[in-house]
Structures are given as structure tokens and as C-alpha cells.
Amino acid sequence: MGYSLNTTIISSSNKQKPENAVILCHGYGGDGKDISILANYWKNYLPKTVFICPDAPERCEVSPSGFQWFDLMNQTSDEILTKSLVAEIKLNKLIDEVKIEYNINTDKIILCGFSQGCMISLQTGLKREDKINSIIGYSGKIIDTKHIENNIKAKPDIILMHGDKDEVVPVNFLLEAKELFNRIDYKIQTKIFQNCEHRIPQEGSSLGLEFIKKKLY
């Protein structure tokens, strides 16, 4: 089966049919191959998991060799929200395709994202009516807190991680998300990495791996 988004697929070398899936969403200007580095590390410890690493749906204005989930340049917050809703539809379509391809339920799917990929993973996962298993978010934010607060349909387990020296997406956005979730009595896990910029440190990939093991194994 072909996917509606160009996709890099990573799985362990054994021939058993995957029992669950992790969909990894790359950051602004990146692509599925970028974030598949994380999947290639995780696959060694997760033999029952298939990793789906899509290219975002649009070519990136700033980095033409890469992709974007939605445009961030010279956009008002309302325009960003509107464009993110289009990307959300496309990510939901991919989730449905993965369910069919591997004959798995939504509760066997984790969304993981870095930066803009974290933003679209949070928005999609929180609004999806058939609850996904969980969300792993690195260095991201909630795109529009009011929109999310008014449109949450499910409460998947969430872990958000962020570097304290991030100048691209400042760490206060993790605190803003945590405040929103606390307000609606939604318990999530968070981790702030010391002396870490806009990236996924080794500790972050290890914490992500342990989180997946706990949720899917």
C-alpha cells in the first residue's frame, strides 16, 4: 500500500508482523529521513514496532530541500492555526492508512514529533476521536492553546521534553503546555534538559525509548 505522504519506513530485521507503530514527525525544514535516525536507534530495542517517518506535506519556503507541516514565515497566529488544521487532516489520513496497512487499532499507535513535528503531533493526537496510545514531544509547543482547550477529544498519555537553552522554540512553551494541562486536570510527564539547545539529546532518545516500551510492550 502506498501512503498519502512520502514515507521512510523503519523496522527491525525480523520478519514478524508489527504489532504497533510509532509515527515520527520531523521539524520545520527537515524530512522523514532526518527523524528516521531516532527510529533506527529505537528499532534495536522494539522488535514488534514499525516506525513511520513521513515527509511533511509542503516544501519548505526557507529550506527548499526540506519540508514543512505548515508555513511559519510572516504568518499571523490565526493564519498559522488555519494552515495547521490542513496539516492535521493530512496526518490523520496517514494514521488511518497505518491502521489499515498493519491491521492495528489506534491504541497501538504513538505519535512522536520534534519541533514543528511535535506541534502537529500534539494538535492531532489531542483532537482525534479514536484515542491514540500516546504522544512523545521534543522541543515543541501547543500551536494555539485556546483552540486545543476547546477541542480536546481524547487524553492520550503525553511526555514533553525540551532543552533549557532552546532559542528556536523557547522552553517556556513547555511550561505553557504544562499549565494548560494542569488547568484541565490532565496529567502529563515533562523533562527539561540542562544546557541543551534545540535538539534531541541522548538522554531524550533514551527517555523516549523507555516511554514506548512502557506504553506498547
Image (cartoon, helix red, strand yellow):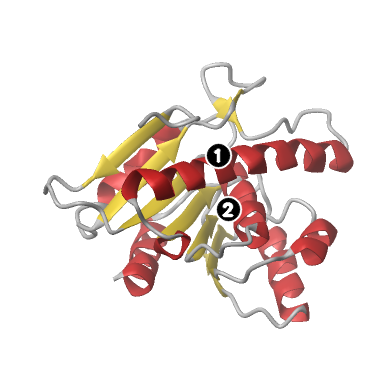
- Find the residue positioned furthest to the left: 14
Residue 86's image quarter?
Answer: top right
- Find the residue positioned furthest to the bottom: 185
Q: Residue at x 41, y 32 (%)?
A: 7
**What residue is pinned by disc 1?**
27
Residue 89's image quarter?
Answer: top right
Q: Where is residue 108? Give x, y as percent.
A: 40, 62
The quarter of the rendered structure image containing the N terminus is: top left
Amino acid found under the numbered disc labelled 1 = Gly
Q: Are marks 2 and 1 in contact (CB under 8 Å)?
A: yes
Mark 2 Cα within 10 Å, few/some/many (few <14, many 20+)? many
Q: Residue at x 53, y 55 (%)?
A: 138
**What residue is pinned by disc 2?**
139
State the separation of the CA atoms marked 2 and 1: 9 Å
Does dot 1 land on a helix, a strand or a loop? loop
Does dot 2 land on a helix, a strand or a loop? loop
Amino acid found under the numbered disc labelled 2 = Ser
Mark 1 Cα within 10 Å, few/some/many (few <14, many 20+)? many
Q: Where is residue 170? Give x, y as percent.
A: 68, 53
The quarter of the rendered structure image containing the C terminus is: bottom left
Foreground pick, 59 / 49: 49
Report the mark closest to the observer, 2 or 1: 1
Q: Where is residue 12? Give x, y as percent.
A: 19, 48
Q: Residue 5: in sight, yes or no?
A: yes
- Left or right: 17 with respect to 186? left
Q: Residue 25: in sight, yes or no?
A: no
- Left or right: 102 with respect to 81? left
